[in-house]
Image (spheres, grey):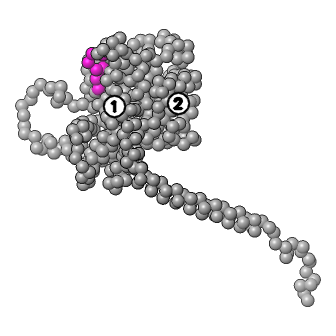
Amino acid sequence: MAFLNQPSDSTFFVETDEPVQQRTINMRDAAKMLARNKQEMIANELSRLACDEYLEDIMQHMRHMEDETLPDANLIDMQREIQWFMRPYLIDFLIEAHAAFSLLPETLFLTVNLLDRYCSKRVVYKQHYQLVGCAALLIAAKYGDKKDRVPQINELNNMCCGLYDAGMFTQMEMHVLNTLDWNIGHPTVDFFTQLIVAEERDSQEVEHMAAYICEIALYHRDFVSTKPSIMARSSLALARAILGKAEVNDGEWDHVENVTLLTLSQHLHQPSVTLARKYSNPYYSKVSGKLADFLAQQAAIARRGAPPSPPSEPTIASKATNVYSTPHKGLGAVPGVVDGYMTPPITPDGVSFGQKNATMKDYQLPPRCPVTPTPQPTHHTSSTYAQPQQQPQQHIAGPTTYFDGASSNMSF
């Protein structure tokens, strides 16, 4: 036969083991995946059963925690150098840093909670204000976020334009933890929002609008001492009204919730540009644009329905307020003793944290960080920030927002 004359090939009838081994490995991985999925289903079912059984105890514990970890805005009023008009700049910085590292939503609210709790217990210098915010962000990210998303100190320092060194971040982080007695856990507004959304089956658009409203509230002193549970319920109710959704009848509202809802509605005008840009993303259902459209419609309706009136002198109550028109200090805020309360301990100031007159000499800022104007202490209207005045003062800088102190040898 002809095929007998063909050259012999020793591998012609020999099967290699590679495909068999590959199939074996794939089957093994598939079996592991099935087993893992089954374990997940069992764990989820057990969690659901346990949640139903212990839900009342869990909620009672959470409400106790929110009372224990609620900052006191009146104590922050006692600060000698930190003033409320500085807060929007720092919140802008924290929001940009939070978005840059893709951290969880609750991390931002926990960061601000740690910042406010620290400022209500310690006197903070202006040149340390941003440093405290960075330390709070590090602690919050380590507490609840994934390890690979926790910011690195050198990355935060770059966002601060190299104002601090690595040791200052570490020492401030430890100082914040010791001041708060390592009590980090706090039921954020995002936690209560998720519970209400799941129970009431609100749409994702309503959830995003409520998150936008809650982050607007971070800029204002009025909501520093507001409980997260009240803030969550009020923001969701306001979000449904803005989006034209049906209101949920979930029981009677008490006086505090009514006041919170009304106050929130009065602070929606002229939100931070940084925050509005964040929520203009399709990922957040472009709720910042929808809120702006709603406010424009309400203003048009008010103009059409308002009767003509003679011109008169504008009063303080009729002036348009914005996110930056916050008071400098509370009444009676004087150094030493305020209303019978001793001022809290001062933030550590030494070699590691830098002396007041040597801070900028030791840490020279790059020329790309411009000086931000300091608002005048006697005028707090929306036009205060319209015309900046360049002053040769020290400052702390962020990615797009920068801070400036009121004294010639200090920056906050």
- Left or right position of 209 against 12: left
Estimate the x, y position of residue 185 in percent, counting from the top left: 45, 36
Estimate the x, y position of residue 129 in percent, counting from the top left: 44, 23
- Give the magenta range: 326-333
Question: Residue at image x 48%, y 10%?
Answer: 357
Q: Nearer the viewer, residue 348 or 46?
A: 46
On-image quarter of the C terminus: top left
Vertical relation: 41 (above or below) 152: below
Estimate the x, y position of residue 221 in percent, counting from the top left: 31, 29
* The label number, if any, that marks residue 178 in the structure image: none
Q: In which quadrant of the rendered view does residue 331 lie?
A: top left
Q: Nearer the viewer, residue 16 or 390?
A: 16
Residue 85 appearing in the image: no
> Does residue 181 belong to the magenta stretch?
no
Q: Amino acid at mark 1?
A: Val
On-image quarter of the N terminus: bottom right
Q: Earlier in the sequence, mark 2 or mark 1?
A: 2
Question: Residue at image x 6%, y 31%?
Answer: 310
Estimate the x, y position of residue 132 in percent, counting from the top left: 46, 25
Q: Which residue is mark 1?
A: 224
Residue 299 appearing in the image: yes
Q: Assess whether mark 1 and mark 2 are in contact (beta carbons under 8 angstroms).
A: no
Q: Amino acid at mark 2?
A: Leu
Vertical relation: 31 (above or below) 104: below
Q: Which residue is mark 2?
A: 156
Question: Residue at image x 85%, y 76%?
Answer: 13
Q: Nearer the viewer, mark 2 or mark 1?
A: 1
- Left or right position of 295 against 351: left
Label 2 secondary element: helix
Question: Residue at image x 58%, y 24%?
Answer: 166
Neighbours of disc 1 within 10 Å: few (<14), some (14-19), many (20+): many
